[in-house]
Every structure is written in C-alpha cells, then in structure tokens.
C-alpha cells in the first residue's frame, strides 16, 4: 500500500480520497475547508494542516482543485518543494490545456513524473469509484498512475502526451453541451407538434438521433431512466460546471484556430442561462431557456 497526498477534498475529491483510503492506502488529505477535512477524516483519511504536509514522504500526490490557477499555485508553492522526487504527481482537476502543459513542464524541470488525469462522471461516480479517467503523460508515468486511478474509476484511458487528458475532457464536454441543447430542442419541438415525448424518446433511442443525453440523461421529466429532470433539475452536473468546460473548450479552440460554431453557440446559451441565476441547476435544465414560456 502507498502513502498518498490528496489535495482538494471538495464534491469530487472527497469521494476519490475516501476510495483510495478504502483500498488501504495511507492518505494524507488537505483542503482549505475545515468541513472537508472533517469529512475526509470520517472517511478514513488523515487530515493534515497544509498541502506541503500532505506531500511529505508521498509515493503519489493527487490534486482535485477548481481551476488552472489553483493547480499552478499549489504545485509551485507546495508540491514541487515538499514531495520527494520519487513521487508521482497526478492532477485530476479539469483545467485549461495550456496550464496543464505548463505545470507538466515545471514538474519535469523539477525532476517529477506527472500526468493530467481529468475525469468524466459526477459526484455520485466519484463516491462510487466509477469515474472515467482520461490521462495525458509519458508511457511510464501512465503505467504508474493506472493502478491508483483504477481504484477510483471504472475506466482509465491513456489519451497521449501531457495535456492530452485535458484536451479529451473538453472535447467530450463540448459534444455533451451541444448534444444536450439539441436534445432539448427536439423534445420541445416534438411536444409542440403534438408528439408524445415518451414516444419520441422510445423512437429516437433506437434511431439515429440516439445519444447519451437522450437515452441516459433525458432532459424531459417522466421520460427514460430517472434523471435530474425528474427532480426539478436539482443535483446532477451543474450548469456552472458545463459553462466552465465550454469556456475551456472555446479558449483551446481559439489557441489552435479551430472552428467550433456549435460549441460556441452552446457556450453562449449556457452563459445566458447561468447569468439568469441558474448556475446551480443541472445542465439539462437549459430546456427552460429554450422554451420561452418557461424561461427562469
Ligand atoms: P469543489 O469546489 O467542490 O472542490 C474543490 C476543493 O478544492 C474545495 O474543497 C476547495 O476548498 C479546495 N481548494 C481550493 N483551493 C485549494 C488550495 N489552495 N489548497 C487546498 N484545497 C483547495 O469542486 P469539485 O466539484 O470537487 O470539482 C473539482 C474539479 O473537478 C474541478 O476542476 C471540476 O471542474 C472537476 N469536475 C467536477 C465534476 C462535478 O460533477 N462536480 C465532474 C467532473 C469534473
């Protein structure tokens, strides 16, 4: 069993650190929030007083932080100085590709092996240990990270060199954002045309309109498996997080001069929906923005 430093014990990191502890690792856990530290303690981790202390003597350091600036600061201020050179560094946060590459370069310059390993799957998957990890980094770093990630997830895929995990994550979520909007539009149109939404669901689920947004995450209440639509769009994947990922995708697209008109339109619509005070609602609630009558 390994000694693991875990930094960032929020909605996602809390469950992930708990799963590593359940697998018998000695997990030194740090977060700025005292509540998060208490929850980590209850889940079998050892709460510590600083990021540097979490890194001390670690075989691996895992970070699950909000955004690129937090990752860059924590690595520069604590991880590079306090972790042993032999420690493997694993950043699971969703951050911009440019920062991910820059932090990986600094890690290499400081003599560390590092991977970016963002996740797909929400809080429930983090708690259940069923996340999908998309990993960027050298082959040997991936081989070292794989066993740890497999203890927190159901799929661990090597996407390519440093930054490739973040590239995969934002491309995936750009599809998801645009696809969810298209699915909501289709339900609204079906309804206005007098087609039973349940019938539309049954038909499109086995036709070429099929998608994850339709079959597994239907944005229409009472249709398909239970989804946030059945709970007044509470819980699930927050609109604010979808917007964050779409902005990262737009930033990355601009940096390589890629044309992403559907992604851009999705970012615009999610921005409007978030600006209207809906950031905490599940991202499938965008159906309310598209249905003028029910705009929040
Ligand atoms: P969160 O805000 O719940 O957790 C982030 C944690 O980091 C907080 O507890 C905060 O106190 C802590 N933190 C911030 N700065 C710190 C520092 N300097 N040192 C130590 N701790 C610090 O966010 P989350 O929902 O857990 O998301 C984490 C990452 O995972 C984000 O990048 C997010 O985009 C990504 N993600 C989230 C989901 C989701 O459904 N929530 C799904 C996939 C990916």
Image (spheres, rainbow, N blue to C red):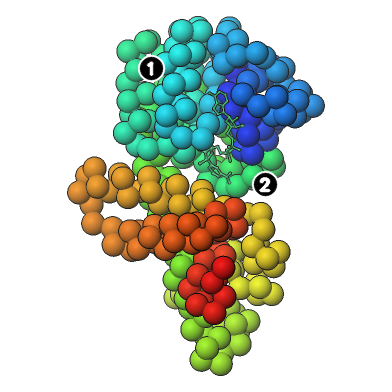
Residue drawn where x is 55% and y is 54% of the image: 279
The quarter in which the N terminus is drawn is top right
Dot 1 lies on which element?
A: helix
Res. 261 visible in picture: yes
**Which residue in the protein does label 2 denote?**
124
What percent of the width, then of the height, locates residue 34?
70, 24
What percent of the width, then of the height, locates residue 129?
66, 39
In which quadrant of this rendering is ligand 1 seen?
Answer: top right
Residue drawn where x is 48% and y is 52% of the image: 242
Residue drawn where x is 51% and y is 35% of the image: 66
In this picture, is 255 found above or below 138? below
Q: Residue furthest left?
A: 257
Res. 130 visible in picture: no
Does residue 122 appear to the left or right of 18 in the view shown?
left
In this picture, is 109 found above or below 8? above
Does residue 40 appear to the left or right of 187 in the view shown?
right
The quarter in which the C terminus is drawn is bottom right
Does residue 166 appear to the left or right of 9 in the view shown?
left
What percent of the width, then of the height, locates residue 213?
53, 65
**Which residue in the protein does label 1 denote?**
107
Q: CA distance from mark 1 to mark 2?
A: 31 Å
């Amino acid at each position: 069993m390994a000694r693991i430093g875990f930094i960032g014990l929020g909605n996602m990191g809390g469950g992930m650190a708990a799963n590593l502890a359940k697998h018998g690792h000695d997990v030194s856990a740090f977060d700025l929030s005292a509540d998060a530290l208490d929850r980590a303690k209850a889940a079998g981790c050892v709460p510590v007083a600083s990021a540097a202390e979490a890194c001390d003597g670690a075989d691996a350091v895992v970070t699950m932080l909000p955004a690129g600036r937090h990752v860059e600061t924590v690595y520069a201020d604590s991880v590079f100085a306090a972790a042993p050179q032999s420690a493997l560094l694993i950043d699971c946060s969703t951050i911009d590709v440019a920062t991910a590459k820059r932090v990986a370069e600094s890690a290499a310059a400081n003599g560390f092996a590092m991977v970016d390993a963002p996740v797909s799957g929400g809080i429930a998957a983090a708690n259940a240990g069923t996340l999908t990890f998309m990993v960027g980094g050298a082959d040997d770093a991936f081989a070292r990270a794989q066993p740890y990630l497999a203890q927190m997830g159901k799929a661990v895929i090597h996407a390519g060199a440093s930054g490739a995990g973040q590239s995969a994550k934002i491309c995936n979520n750009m599809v998801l954002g645009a696809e969810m909007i298209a699915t909501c539009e289709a339900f609204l149109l079906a309804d206005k045309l007098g087609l039973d939404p349940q019938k539309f669901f049954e038909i499109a689920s086995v036709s070429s309109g099929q998608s994850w947004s339709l079959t597994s995450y239907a944005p229409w209440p009472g249709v398909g498996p239970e989804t946030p639509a059945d709970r007044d769009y509470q819980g699930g994947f927050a609109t604010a997080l979808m917007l964050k990922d779409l902005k990262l995708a737009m930033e990355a697209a601009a940096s390589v001069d890629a044309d992403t008109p559907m992604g851009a339109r999705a970012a615009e619509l999610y921005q409007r929906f978030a600006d209207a005070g809906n950031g905490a609602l599940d991202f499938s609630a965008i159906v309310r923005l598209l249905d003028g009558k029910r705009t929040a």
